[in-house]
Amino acid sequence: MVDDKGQVFFQDAATRAVWKIDARGRLSEFHTGIGGHWMCLDSPGSFSRTQPRYFNRITSLGVAPTILLADGGAPLAVCRDGNLNYPSHSSRNDEFSPGGCQLVRVAPDGTRAKFAPELTATRG
């Protein structure tokens, strides 16, 4: 991921660390002790003052940009509208848990809703 300052953030699964390359090309360890399959950058800081359920944040509360990690198999993105979007399960007790075939949108205030319910799973 690249932020608006030209800093690059990436994960290293072997060390469970997130690394940063600054705009001058210097490499540094940004966060250690947690890794994930997916990571997203909240450049505008929509979630800078909240802790979304299910996902880990590696920036302190109140700090933007917010970097969120999914430690499981659910890709996530904070889109231009400022909402966090990810796939969720529709058949579990908690229909908003990550990692399935329906999309969920989370507003910065924590409100969750199904997104694009007309999408269905396909088999190839």
Image: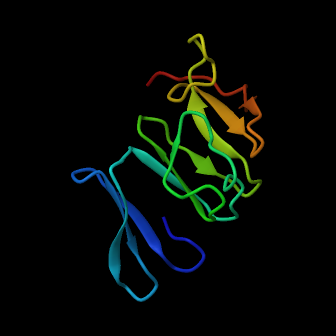
**Residue at left 64%, top 52%?**
78
51 relative to 60, above or below: above
Nearer the observer, 59 or 114:
59
Question: Which image quarter holds the C terminus?
Answer: top left
Residue 19 rendering spot, x and y as whole percentages: 36, 66
Q: Quadrant of residue 3?
A: bottom right
Q: Residue at x 29, y 51 (%)?
A: 16
Q: Nearer the viewer, residue 82 or 48?
A: 48
Nearest the camera: 111 or 85? 111
Coloration mode: rainbow
Residue 103 image offset from top left, x and y in percent: 64, 32
In front of the other: 117 or 50: 50
Name the residue: 59% across, 49% down.
77
Residue lying at 47% horizontally and 21% vertically, measured from the top left: 123
- Give the left or right position of residue 24, taking residue 94 as reference: left
Q: Residue furthest front?
A: 61
- Residue 36 locus on image (x, y percent): 38, 44
Residue 22 is left or right of residue 111, and the answer is left
Marks counted in the figure total 0
Above/below status of 23 relative to 36: below
View extreme (bottom): residue: 24
Give the vertical position of 121 relative to 10 (above or below). Answer: above
Image location (x, y in percent) of residue 12: 29, 56
Q: Does residue 27 appear to the left or right of 46 in the view shown?
A: left
